[in-house]
Image (cartoon, rainbow, N blue to C red):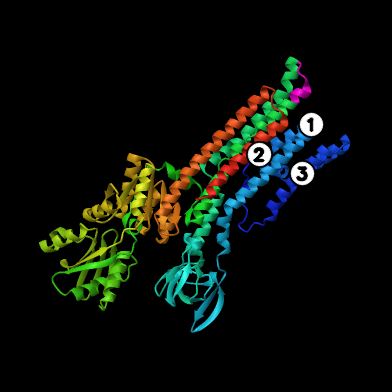
Amino acid sequence: MTVSSTALNQPFRRPRLLAHKELVFAIAGGLFFLAGLAAGPVELAVFFYILSYGVGGYFKAREGLTDLIHDRSLNVEILMILAALGAASIGYWSEGAILIFIFAMSGALETYTLQKSEKDLSELVKLAPEQAVLVTNGKTVTVPVDSLRRGDVVLVRNGERIPADGIVRRGASAVDESAITGEPVPVEKLDGSDVFNGTMNGSGTLEVEVTRENKDSLFQKMIALVDEAKTSRPPAQRFIERIEGPYVITVLIATALLIALPPLLWQAPFEATFYRAMVMLVVASPCAVVASIMPALLSAISTGARFGLLTKGGIPLEQLVKTNVIAVDKTGTLTKGSPRVTNVYALNGSEEQALAAVAGTEAESSHPLARAVTSYASRKGIQLRSPLTTTSHTGKGIEAAFEDGIWQIGNETWARADSWPEEARRQHRAWTSTGHTVIFALQDNTPRLMIALKDEVRPEAAAFVKEMTKYGIETVMITGDNEETAKAIASETGIRSWVSRCMPEQKVTEIERLRREKGAVVMIGDGVNDAPAMAKADIGIAMGSGTDVAVDTADMVLMKSDLSKIMLAVRLSSRLRRIVIQNLVFSSAVILFLLTANFAQSLTLPLGVIGHEGSTILVILNGLRLLRA
């Protein structure tokens, strides 16, 4: 039995009638088989057996003949059809009928399990809103969500799904984000909070400013990931499907030889030889081998999606457990990505004047550190100054031109912090030793300001590092911060290896080095500067709160920025590998055992059918265990 492309490439809103029909036809075939057993006259029994063949075997025969005619490929369905017809041709109608019945039932079960494993994925589409209430000039009008543009304001009443990614501009509510994050607890949303397409508004009414068009929303990215995950196949499955055709041809040739040679060479009875050939045709079929991977993989993908873990196909989930090293960015990955200003140190002038220039420059940036500085200045009531021009220097900082001079705002290397006054350097060392990040500001090359920021380490970070170690995976932190800050964060999380003062382009070099020295590497990040390194790694994982570039580059996406989801992914990957190996070993062993029993002439066709199809059902059910987290 094959995991057909037809079963895997159905549209999301697939009618259930097809699955029901397959099951109903299989059961009807079984009833006709029982009627044949109970019938008295031989002619009546054969009539019921023919009905059992035609009704019970309809779907599998259609699938096999379609592949044969349109794709010019042989599959296990053809083997089963030939075996049943062969049994009937020598008078073993009941054996052929039971073969068709059990084969049809196992096929119906396989279709059911595939649909069940896809259910959590396909339900996403049903949650996507199709219309939105647009607010223009104080009036509301209902429009399609595809017509929304950045800057539009939409009204979301209580109990409605939010139609677009955006920022709350008015109102307060608790929003159920379980469709994206898998977490059942509603999240409080206030003025300035981010909200996402497809999530459910609670009891309050919100006015939301659209920040992404529908096609670019996080929810639509989820749906795209789902579509890719549902249709992709890992290398092992592709290998099995590639050899299925040649294997079937080999079995057919062996069957033909088994039918022809014994009567010709040893005068064996043709009927007995033909019977043995039909048994071999059944038990040599690789149904269970073919079904060993995809039901298990789809079940694992489905479970991940239910808990807010999405993968671009099955390959990343299959390969994750083979990883040797996980490289993690610091800001927004190991930490919450919401730093706050804790201290300010001013030199050579007014602190307020310097903050006005620095915060005014940072106001144009979406970087978490920039937002923290701007927010701090606003809370202090400082009037921000707008620069005349700005020039960004990736990995270093930003340069801004004001009427009173050129300001440089960035890291210690760019600011040449080692040339600052001793007191400032001492203060800098004290801050970094406790895990602070420090922003430096110079006006016309004159030191003016140091700003200390602290980002809270994620509460699950230490447990994440510990669990990765349990699986034999080393965690390496890669950060642009200085050595002291990196060391402090590493100590807090239990990380033993880190790379500090790492520019974005150097992250790629570090990933290449880790791959060369240690083997398969995973890169976890959330920012634009992490995207090249994520692309270079064997597997890239993006935090859901990250930038569009990071999410688009990643092989896996955490819809909630929670490192425990990566622990879930590794556990699923480990279980998937274990179950697939169990299935392949078991199914291969059953085939070898049944073939041996057949050549020893101690296996009947009904027992061969039960053993063969029973093993197929067992491997499918074993894979279905991955639906439990």
User: The residue under label 1 is which amino acid type?
Assistant: Tyr
Tag nearer the camera, 2 or 1? 1
Can residue 530 be seen here? Answer: yes
Residue that numbered label 3 is attached to: 29
Residue that numbered label 2 is attached to: 73
Q: Position of residue 516 (x, y in %)?
A: 34, 40
Residue that numbered label 1 is attached to: 92
Q: Position of residue 267 (x, y in %)?
A: 76, 16
Q: Position of residue 110 (x, y in %)?
A: 63, 45
User: The residue under label 2 is which amino acid type?
Assistant: Ser
Say which quarter of the image contains residue 107.
top right
Magenta span? 267-274
241 displayed left or right of 600: left
418 displayed left or right of 204: left
**Which of disc 1 and disc 2 is earlier in sequence?**
2
Q: Secondary structure at mark 2?
A: loop
Distance of mark 3 from mark 2, alpha carbons?
27 Å
- Relative vertical location of residue 497 with respect to residue 215 in this rendering, above or below: above
544 displayed left or right of 215: left
- In the image, farthest residue toward the left: 422
Q: What secondary structure is the stretch in magenta mostly built from?
A: helix
User: The residue under label 3 is which amino acid type?
Assistant: Gly
**In contact (CB < 8 Å): disc 3 and disc 2:** no
Density class for disc 2 (Cα within 10 Å; few <14, some 14-19, many ≥20) is some
Which of the image's four quarters has the N terminus? top right
- Relative vertical location of residue 339 with respect to residue 72 in this rendering, above or below: below
Q: Nearer the viewer, residue 437 or 66?
A: 437
The magenta stretch spans residue 622: no
